[in-house]
Image (cartoon, rainbow, N blue to C red):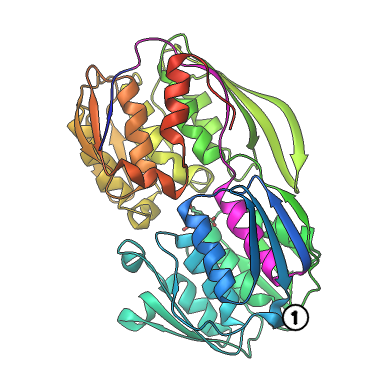
Amino acid sequence: MVTLEPARKPLKGALRVPGDKSISHRAVILGGIARGTTEITGFLPGADCLATVRCMQALGVTVEVLAPDHLKVTGVGLEGLREPADVLDVGNSGTTIRLLAGLVAGRPYLTVLTGDASIRRRPMDRVAVPLRQMGAQVDGREGGRLAPLVIRGGGLRPIHYRSPVASAQVKSAVLLAGLSAEGETGVTEPARSRDHTERMLAGFGARVRVEGTTAWVEGRPRLEGQRLEVPGDISSAAFFLVAAALVPGSEVLIENVGVNPTRTGILDALRAMGAPIEVLNLREAAGEPVADLLVRGGQALRGTVIAGNLIPRLIDEIPVLAVAAAVAEGPTEIRDAAELRVKESDRIAAVAAELRKLGARVEERPDGMIIEGGARLQGGQVESHGDHRLAMALAVAAQVAAGPVQIAGAEAVGVSFPGFFEHLQALRRGGGAAE
Ligand code: S3P
């Protein structure tokens, strides 16, 4: 349980958020199947990415932890991966289970993947279906819909998969499986999801083509180890962007944040709500655009519509955007976001329930929510539902509540942002500290 008092003065300072979660997972996976060593700096030492490290070790890859955010991966090549001696436990990490399902689908042995109670509720048929089309045997509870997943891989053929959902996890699972098939494997999505896998595969030497919302990879590539500098996670920066936008007089600089256009929907949405955010010092690192983000607080925010192709570009930021919407002037409508129901928690039901406890007016829809806006949030007791992003969104709400907010299950922040509360306290004291 964490208790947060409202911010009594502006949030001020400069900080660095930990490394991008999506990129950290991919760096360990691709490093493991490349030849030679891959040195990763800025790695996110959160529970999710550490689960990927343990799973890759169980598949025969050597990963040395030189510092919590600095790894040396000794790649064994795709052919060098070996049958794990035990069930692989992904913890709370959807990215780990879905990407590794794709990776091991191409390997000629048995892999069993499972995770915590939340993972065992989340849909796995979205990866089981295409991986079976490629020739892998994929089973699990409820006919392969739920983990534990049991995969007997090998002998894959390339496919062109038309995914019903815009999901980078599905796209990446199919592309990673495609590495073991001879010929070109493609995935077409209804809208463009994050493209870190495509960028990083190309950086490691694979032949990747992108045409609109279709990504192709040529199988059996020669992947070479790389030096990778993981940028800060915009999904973690999002909590401070919103907190600073809401607390009058705030001025917060978040340095070294990944600003890949498939991830920057949060900037578009906050700007549409009237929050002034500046993108400074734009540069490139590890094939990804990176910048410093400066946000100033105090402008009255207004409600907006968040829908369509914008959704995959800010899917993980919707809990914290809902907080901004609750206090903004006028209603905010979020639609086309049914995916939120199958995240770490049912984020539509959970966000609505918890924000209501603080006095917000939120109406649930099957694929989103209507947030009435104009709420004067009050203090109270809320819970994270075991969901890291909900815990952090509620901590942001606490900054502008009228009284103290107690968050049960706040330790969930360690999944993606160890040190979150320390950074928040530093900004409240007026001197955000760099990582
Ligand atoms: C991720 C993809 C997204 C996102 C998740 C990370 C990834 O999930 O919500 O936090 O790293 O590929 P979906 O692929 O289910 O949309």
| Residue 401 picture quarter | top left
Q: What residue type is labelled 1?
A: Gly
Q: Taking 213 as reference, is 373 above or below it? A: above
Residue 10 percent coordinates (x, y): 44, 11
User: Is residue 151 visible in the rendered structure shown here?
Assistant: yes
SS assignment at label 1: loop
Q: What residue is shown with label 1?
A: 183
Q: Taking 1 as reference, is 423 above or below it? A: above
Give yes or no for residue 66 being in the magenta stretch: no
Tell which of 103 and 275 is nearer to you.
103
Q: Taking 278 as reference, is 316 above or below it? A: below
Tell which of 415 and 361 is nearer to you.
415
Specify few, some or many for label 1: CA neighbours under 10 Å numbering under 14, 14-19, or 20 or more: some
Q: Does the residue labelled 1 lie within 8 Å of ligand 1?
A: no
Q: Taking 222 as reference, is 403 above or below it? A: above
- The reply, left or right, for residue 177 in relation to residue 130 is right
Q: Give the range drawn in magenta.
A: 7-35
Counting labels gives: 1
| Residue 185 picture quarter | bottom right
Residue 120 percent coordinates (x, y): 33, 68
Say which residue appears at 48% left-offset and 56% top-offset: 48
Tell which of 114 and 167 is nearer to you.
114
Please identify the quadrant where the C terminus is shown. top right
Please identify the quadrant where the N terminus is shown. top left
Residue 193 percent coordinates (x, y): 57, 53
Say which residue appears at 49% left-offset and 33% top-offset: 238
- The reply, left or right, for residue 167 in relation to residue 257 is left
Say which residue appears at 52% left-offset and 33% top-offset: 237
Give yes or no for residue 16 being in the magenta stretch: yes
